[in-house]
Image: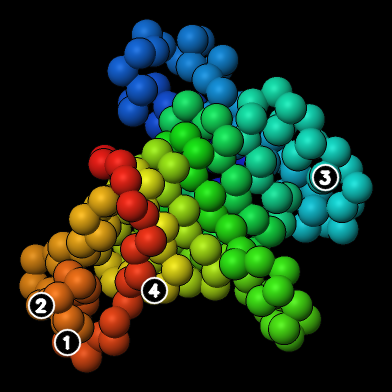
């Protein structure tokens, strides 16, 4: 993730990305009403308030944004530059999640924790949510749970659920539960289709049973 520029420049980049990636829009003026952009801009403000210790104000901004957009992003989550939230409905991003630059997030995506029964056993302050690398695409209703790492330029298809680390360039499709390696990566593991660089352990568990991307 590249260093964050000033707030105004970041907001300008967010607007430009929406115009570039959403073919239904005719220009910047129309893009100002884009649901995903509204949610992202609200989070930019809430996250800065949160970082300054103004947690009540940050949560208030996040709560209002959720009511207006259907997108729930915890103020503590870190979102990189040029993140594109398409449609936005029912997107959930947890407190300790980190999202890299140039990430595309479709509707109903969850970047969440495994659950309180697991989180309560972690040390205080431990990461509970995913880290998503640069250039990742998260398809509709994709779910990534726990303190896993998704490598740069991975693609997680619609309806897929990921609970273990993904190597860079991985491809996860549902319902076949297949990870296709990027060029230069060799398959590892068994017949489940796991892939990664040499020496990578079985890195992916796909729980989806239906859907396609």
The answer to whether residue 142 is seen in the rendering is yes
Residue drawn at (91%, 47%) of the image = 56
Within-10-Å neighbours for mark 3: few <14, some 14–19, many 20+: many
| Residue located beneath label 1 in the image | 198
User: How far separated are the C-alphas under marks 4 and 2?
Assistant: 16 Å
> In the image shown, does 37 or 128 lie closer to the viewer?
128
- Circle nearer the N terminus (3, 1): 3
> In the image shown, does 30 or 145 lie closer to the viewer?
145
Image quadrant assignment for residue 59: top right
- Circle nearer the N terminus (2, 3): 3
Q: Nearer the viewer, mark 3 or mark 4?
A: 4
Residue drawn at (87%, 58%) of the image = 53
**Secondary structure of residue under mark 4:** loop
Q: Residue furthest bottom?
A: 199
User: How far separated are the C-alphas under marks 3 and 4?
Assistant: 30 Å
Q: Quadrant of the N terminus?
A: bottom left
Please give left or right for residue 75 compared with residue 102 in the image.
Answer: right
**Secondary structure of residue under mark 3:** helix
Within-10-Å neighbours for mark 1: few <14, some 14–19, many 20+: few
The answer to whether residue 2 is seen in the rendering is no
Please give left or right for residue 78 compared with residue 184 in the image.
Answer: right
> In the image shown, does 77 or 5 lie closer to the viewer?
77
Please give left or right for residue 55 compared with residue 9 in the image.
Answer: right
**Secondary structure of residue under mark 1:** loop
| Residue located beneath label 4 in the image | 165
User: How far separated are the C-alphas under marks 3 and 1?
Assistant: 44 Å
Whether the residues at callouts 2 and 1 have beta carbons within 8 Å, the answer is yes
Within-10-Å neighbours for mark 2: few <14, some 14–19, many 20+: some
């Amino acid at each position: 993730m590249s260093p964050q520029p000033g707030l105004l420049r970041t907001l300008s980049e967010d607007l430009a990305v929406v115009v570039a990636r959403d073919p239904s829009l005719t220009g910047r003026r129309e893009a100002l009403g884009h649901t995903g952009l509204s949610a992202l801009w609200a989070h930019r403000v809430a996250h800065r308030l949160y970082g300054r210790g103004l947690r009540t104000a940050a949560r208030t901004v996040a709560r209002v944004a959720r009511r207006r957009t259907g997108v729930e992003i915890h103020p503590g989550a870190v979102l990189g530059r040029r993140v594109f939230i398409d449609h936005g409905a029912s997107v959930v991003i947890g407190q300790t999640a980190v999202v890299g630059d140039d990430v595309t997030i479709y509707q109903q995506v969850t970047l969440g924790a495994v659950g309180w029964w697991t989180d309560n056993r972690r040390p205080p302050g431990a990461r509970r949510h995913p880290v998503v690398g640069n250039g990742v695409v998260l398809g509709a209703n994709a779910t990534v749970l726990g303190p896993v790492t998704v490598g740069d330029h991975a693609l997680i298809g619609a309806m897929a659920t990921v609970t273990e680390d993904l190597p860079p360039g991985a491809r996860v499709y549902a319902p076949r539960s297949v990870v296709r390696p990027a060029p230069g990566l060799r398959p590892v593991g068994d017949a489940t289709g796991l892939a990664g660089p040499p020496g990578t352990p079985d890195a992916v568990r796909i729980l989806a049973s239906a859907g396609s991307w």
